[in-house]
Amino acid sequence: MASRIEHRAEFREGVADVYLAQSDEGALRARLAEIGGAHARLDEHSETGDGVRFTLVQGVSADRLPQAVRTIHKGDLIVHREQVWRRDGEGWTGTAKATVEGVPGEIKARTELRVGGTGTELRSTGEVKVRIPLVGGKLERLIGEQVTKLLEREAEFTAKWLAERG
């Protein structure tokens, strides 16, 4: 069974500005430098006909992992994350896929940027699946919590990045 991920953030700025903060190569590199963790890098970034595709590598140091994870996984957690954004009417729709080195499973999410009440709303919904008998469900919940915290930190970074450029 999979664990659900849900996150929502609002920004005062318009959809176009928030999209750039979420997809611009310079913004991504700045975000990784500040909150990407161990092994952080931008592996690929390319414009498509109707959006952008990029691949990030992020890490969580072993000493910051819960004991339950350290029992099963030795060393740092290295996350490979692919994000695709496509224009969708007046907003943007994205898909994200992530895998963790050495952990059988995946994280999939759908992301949306839409005009919100006072600016732009960024919404992410998805799920974490870990295929390890007996402990998979517990790991899914732990990873889901960490992904949600990461999305919160990314939203905080985006708000700060936008404010500095506004």
Image (tube, grey):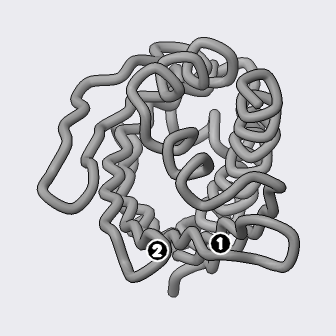
Q: On the image, which quarter does residue 102 sit in? A: top left
Residue pictured at 55% horizontal, 21% vertical: 32
Residue pictured at 69% horizontal, 41% vertical: 154
Q: Residues within 10 Å of mark 1 (few under 14, many from 20)?
A: some
Q: On the image, which quarter does residue 92 sit in? A: bottom left
Q: On the image, which quarter does residue 10 sit in? A: bottom right
Of labels 2 and 1, earlier in sequence is: 2
Residue 94 at x, y percent in the picture: 40, 67
- Mark 2 is on which residue type? Arg
Closer to the camera in the image, 67 or 160: 160
Provide the residue designation for mark 1: 123
Residue 48 at x, y percent in the picture: 15, 51
Eyeballing the image, is 91 above or below 71?
below
Residue pictured at 74% horizontal, 46% vertical: 155
Can you name the residue that lies furthest to the bottom here? Answer: 1
Q: Which element is circle 2 on? A: strand
**Quarter that holds the C terminus:** top right
**CA separation, marks 2 and 1?**
8 Å
Left or right of 52, for residue 157: right
Eyeballing the image, is 160 above or below 143?
above
Residue 146 at x, y percent in the picture: 71, 49
Q: Which element is circle 1 on? A: strand
Closer to the camera in the image, 151 or 119: 119
Residue pictured at 75% horizontal, 25% vertical: 64
- Mark 1 is on which residue type? Arg
Provide the residue designation for mark 2: 110
